[in-house]
Image (cartoon, helix red, strand yellow):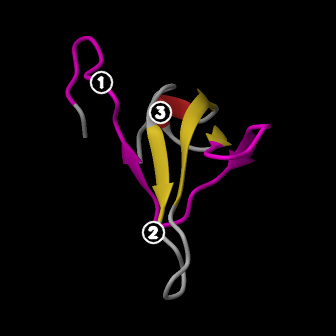
Amino acid sequence: MKAAAGDHLVIPGRHVNDPVRSGEIVEVHGPNGGPPYLVRWVGADEPALIFPGPDAHVEHTATREGSSPA
């Protein structure tokens, strides 16, 4: 998983009718765009540091200079 600040992290609900969690990645703390990520979740006041699981995915907000969205 690779991300940059400004991308969005999306985690589907684990059970039927669970909401999808999404938030903006504020900081990337891992090497080469890897986790952990500091994420400001929709509806939350403070960002949280997270190591996303295998069900999570990154939605890239814009093409970074010299690269393409993965």
Q: Residue at x 48, y 26 (%)?
A: 6
Q: Would you name the residue on which mark 1 appears?
A: 62
Q: What segment carries the magenta color?
A: 41-68
Q: Residue 45 lies in magenta, yes or no?
A: yes
Which numbered circle lies on residue 55? 2
Label 2 residue SS:
loop
Which numbered circle lies on residue 15? none
Single out the mark in the foreground, 2 or 1. Answer: 1
Main secondary structure of the magenta stretch: loop
Relative placement, left or right, of 67 versus 57 is left
Q: Residues within 10 Å of mark 1 (few under 14, many from 20)?
A: few
Amino acid at dot 1: Ala
Single out the mark in the foreground, 2 or 3. Answer: 2
Relative placement, left or right, of 40 versus 45 is left
Which numbered circle lies on residue 33? 3
Expressed as whole percent of the image width and height from the top left, the position of residue 19 reads 54, 70
Q: Residue at x 63, y 53 (%)?
A: 51
Q: Residue at x 30, y 18 (%)?
A: 64
> Could you tell me how far apart the alpha carbons at marks 2 and 3 are, in whole angstroms?
18 Å
Which callout, 2 or 1, points at the residue further toward the start of the chain? Answer: 2
Expressed as whole percent of the image width and height from the top left, the position of residue 35 reads 57, 44
